[in-house]
Amino acid sequence: MITVNNLSLRYGKRILFDDVNLKFTSGNCYGIIGANGAGKSTFLKILQGDVDPTTGQVTFSKGMRLAVLKQNHFEFDQIPVMQTVLMGHKTLWAVMQEREAIYAKSDFSEEDGVRAGELENTFGEMDGWNAESSAAELLSNLGIKESLHTKLMKELDGNQKVRVLLAQALFGNPDILFLDEPTNDLDVQTINWLEDFLADYQGIILVVSHDRHFLDAVCTNVVDIDYSKMTIYSGNYSFWYQSSQLVAKQKADSNKKAEDRIRELQDFIRRFSANASKSRQATSRKKALDKINLEDIKPSSRKYPGLQFNNVNREAGNEILSVENLSKTVNGEVLFKNVNFSVKKGDKIAVLGHSIAVSAFLAILAGEDKEYKGNFTWGVTTSVANIPNDNTRFFEGVDLNLIDWLRQFSPEEKDETFIRGFFGRMLFSGEEVLKNCGVLSGGEKMRCMFSRMMLMRANVLVFDEPTNHLDLESITALNNGMSDFKGTILFTSRDHELVETIANRVIEITPKGMIDKEMDFDEFIKSERVAEQRAELLKSK
Ligand SMILES: Nc1ncnc2c1ncn2[C@@H]1O[C@H](COP(=O)(O)OP(=O)(O)O)[C@@H](O)[C@H]1O
Ligand SMILES: [Mg+2]
């Protein structure tokens, strides 16, 4: 168990945490959520002892060992894989180092001999003789083949590195595991693998993530950091979001009788836990839900931005887009070729493939990139608004406040109140809209781009990684906006939940051709037929 008592942290005048009291217990996985800068990473650092709190204590049950999945994937680049794993057990690693240093001495003194004896003892007690073989076994279980164990970390690809870093964290069976945004830069297969792995892990897990699919798959509890308070809720992220939305709705409806409210909540929990029972973590999650006290569910005080794209200028006709033999080559390297398809009204298409190829493809269709071969034609009634992967050109060297910045994209209505309305929905308040657009953070720039998209009132939307830099609230709001949109969408995203809930068609583009399926994302990634088709395609000339 980890107990946090009366914890607070201030940086100057700013209060990050105030009087936090929490208990974390074995068998549970806690998903820590909160806006950018709320203090999620700092909280983990306090628990690790890397940051001193202003007041309060953190206590661990006796003998519990803590391990952390390193966030910096390049930290061990110059170190061999096997050694990287061994370094995970700090005390054992220190003993091994000292022992080696003593034996390497040419003038081996009597004192050295005594010390060496002590070290041999500790080494034996820690099962040091088996360390390498158990590290090797762990690596192999995590899908890192023996031929890689002697390679340097820098020779591995990003997905393999994370597996090694996880082996490092798990080496020596820690009782507690911390992970700070572990799914960043991982492919969907590795994320799925990590989800399964963590769902079966018996110790205490604390994880920070913006990935809702991941949070839902692994968490038994949600820890919400909001206005310097921290609260633990039972259930995973979806449960937290939907139940707190439901309670907020019930509160707003003053006519509703108390019994009706309770019945509605109970129904909701029953339905939710029935769904949860499909997952591997069913038992502990079910237990958590069974224990829920209805009064414990509180309406969220979080503000969600409002992303609505349905106020289109005109509805599109039936001709949306037809693409013929589209291909692109950069410096002799084929990004994609032979792309042929036509878009039906209401298609919501997820585009998969190498991220550079997909970005180029979407930029071409959005009219931003003119370098390509082949043809594509948009229907005469269509209008397109896009969120590009790189929005630098919209902001760099542009000396405008936010109001004037957005006004550029409004063809008719230039009135300030009208323009401010779009920022209001994106949670920019009062004075904030007078900031210069050059000083914005990544997340703020994205919110400006969404304001622009809403203002353009297009009937076709193109998104290239729209969840970049967004916090969970904004991702959820974007997801809702894209679901509700009645027009056509072409998009790519690494957010599993977003792709799974939006796409009704998946197109994968490759240097050898394309795959085009009317199915949802989970079906697509699990389909053996798709895998065969891809293998055939990649073999072809
Ligand atoms: N040493 C420090 N001095 C002052 N402010 C800091 C320090 N370390 C972090 N902060 C601030 O504390 C806030 C919380 O940071 P962090 O824990 O990284 O947020 P999160 O992980 O939730 O995005 C940020 O606004 C950050 O700028
Ligand atoms: Mg952080």
Image: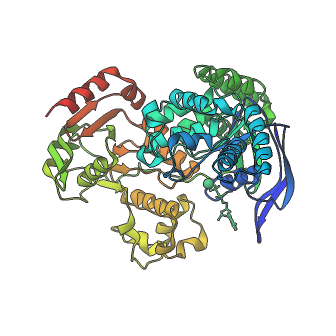
Front-most of 440 and 308? 440
Q: Residue at x 44, y 42 (%)?
A: 151
Percent coordinates x, y for residue 322 in the rendering: 18, 42
Q: Residue at x 36, y 52 (%)?
A: 312
Residue 146, given in percent of the width and then of the height, sits at 46, 31
- Residue 213: image location, x then y, percent: 53, 36
The image shows residue 421 at horizontal and vertical percentages of 51, 63
Q: Quadrant of residue 14?
A: bottom right
Instruction: From the viewer's side, name the closer residue of 50 and 227.
Output: 50
Residue in front for this viewpoint, 119 or 404: 119
**Rendered position, 6 above or below 337:** below
> How is this picture coloured?
rainbow
Tell whether 132 sits left or right of 449.
Answer: right
**322 left or right of 95?**
left
Q: Quadrant of ligand 2?
A: bottom right
Work out which quarter of the rendered image holds the N terminus and state it.
top right
**Looking at this view, is 363 or 53 the one in front?**
53
Query: What quarter of the picture does the C terminus occupy?
Result: top left
In the picture shown, does residue 537 fall above or below 108? above
Q: Is residue 411 visible?
A: yes
Residue 495 visible (yes or no): no
Q: Residue at x 34, y 47 (%)?
A: 355
Question: Which residue in the rendered view is the most extreme toward the bottom?
Answer: 399
Q: Is residue 45 above or below residue 290?
A: below
Using the rendered view, name the quadrant where residue 46 is placed.
Answer: bottom right
Q: How many marks?
A: 0
